């Protein structure tokens, strides 16, 4: 069977929006090729063993498993990140949060930043890479997630990160509590917290079924984590510092209300590349 023939059959078997791309990603992963190199070999014959292996990966994808869990990698902010089922798969729209954070972090100053619910470390790593003078704290409630984030930092050689085990600001415990000075205030607090409502049918469909539920939903109306972080961050942000949340496309107005209610100023919502509300931010200016 040729590369071209396998890709066509595979794409036809997948019931996804991105069937052709998914098939290409599985095969490039298996063959250790870039997509450009794969395209240069469309007429090459595949070994039977390769076809068998590729079909097995395809079957996992056909059952809904995210490509990033099958290949173990996902690109975010030009960085190849190692991804396991212990972490949410980084989404392209989260780069909007990174862009908005960078606009508020001067490059020529020592800064302290925290990423709450870091997962694979995507946001923290992007900020740490772009702002070498910042110390970026990467907090997560999951030990397994922090292990993935730590591995990513090591592989990428990004050293200005500190890993913290904790349940938002209230539950920082053990070693982490000792390593994170309770008096420390941040120039910027960023979070892509769980925000899907507990009864959202999407949790039971497609890729989301395979992701850690605690990374997707705080249950209830989906806003509990945002409410808690917004309240507690007030004691943790420097005067003039920023709080930024990623949230669902239908949560912009509600999140603005939460931030305004908690006393933040300059509250605004930024849209993603699909023109949907995605990031809401505010500035801590009260004394
Ligand atoms: N963006 C994810 C989704 O709806 C949710 C991520 C999150 O809850 N932080 O697919």
Image: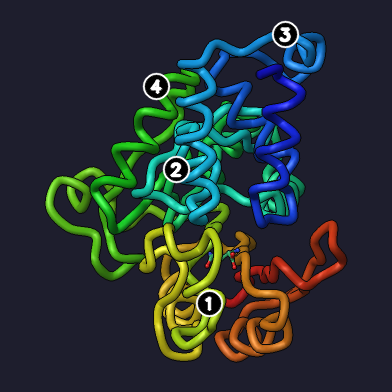
Snapshot quadrant of residue 9 = top right
| Ligand 1 location (quadrant) | bottom right
Q: Which residue is mark 3?
A: 44
Q: Secondary structure at mark 1?
A: loop
Circle nearer the N terminus (3, 4):
3
Circle nearer the N terminus (1, 4):
4
Residue 196's disc is 1
Question: At which x and y percent is residue 257?
Answer: 66, 89
Snapshot quadrant of residue 44 = top right
Q: Residue at x 47, y 88 (%)?
A: 199
Q: Which residue is mark 2?
A: 120
Q: How many marks?
A: 4
Q: Secondary structure at mark 2?
A: loop
Q: Is mark 3 within 8 Å of ligand 1?
A: no
191 or 6: which is nearer to us?
6
**Mark 1: few, some, or many residues within 10 Å (few <14, many ≥20)?**
many
Q: Which residue is mark 4?
A: 154
Q: CA distance from mark 4 to mark 2?
A: 12 Å
Q: Are marks 1 and 3 in contact (CB under 8 Å)?
A: no
Q: CA distance from mark 3 to mark 4?
A: 37 Å
Q: Are marks 2 and 3 in contact (CB under 8 Å)?
A: no
- Work out whether 269 lies above or below 72: below
Quarter of the N terminus within the rendering: top right
Q: CA distance from mark 2 to mark 1?
A: 19 Å
């Amino acid at each position: 069977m040729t590369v071209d023939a396998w890709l066509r059959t595979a794409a036809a078997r997948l019931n996804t929006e991105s069937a052709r791309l998914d098939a290409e990603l599985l095969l490039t992963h298996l063959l250790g090729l870039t997509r450009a190199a794969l395209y240069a070999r469309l007429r090459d014959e595949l070994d039977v063993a390769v076809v068998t292996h590729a079909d097995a990966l395809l079957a996992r994808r056909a059952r809904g498993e995210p490509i990033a869990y099958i290949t173990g990698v996902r690109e975010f902010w030009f960085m190849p990140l190692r991804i396991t089922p212990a972490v949410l798969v980084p989404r392209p729209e989260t780069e909007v949060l990174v862009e908005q954070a960078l606009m508020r972090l001067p490059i020529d100053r020592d800064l302290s930043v925290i990423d709450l619910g870091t997962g694979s470390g995507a946001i923290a790593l992007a900020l740490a890479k772009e702002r070498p003078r910042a110390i970026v704290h990467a907090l997560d409630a999951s030990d397994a997630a922090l292990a993935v984030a730590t591995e990513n930092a090591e592989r990428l050689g990004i050293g200005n990160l500190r890993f913290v085990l904790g349940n938002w600001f209230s539950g920082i415990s053990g070693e982490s509590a000792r390593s994170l000075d309770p008096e420390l205030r941040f120039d910027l607090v960023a979070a892509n917290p769980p925000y899907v409502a507990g009864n959202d049918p999407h949790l039971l469909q497609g890729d989301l079924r395979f992701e850690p539920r605690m990374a997707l939903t705080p249950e209830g109306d989906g806003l509990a984590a945002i409410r808690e972080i917004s309240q507690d961050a007030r004691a943790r942000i420097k005067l003039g510092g920023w709080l930024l949340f990623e949230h669902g496309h239908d949560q912009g107005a509600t999140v603005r209300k939460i931030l305004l209610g908690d006393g933040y100023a300059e509250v605004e919502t930024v849209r993603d590349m699909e023109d949907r509300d995605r990031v809401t931010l505010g500035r801590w200016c009260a004394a």
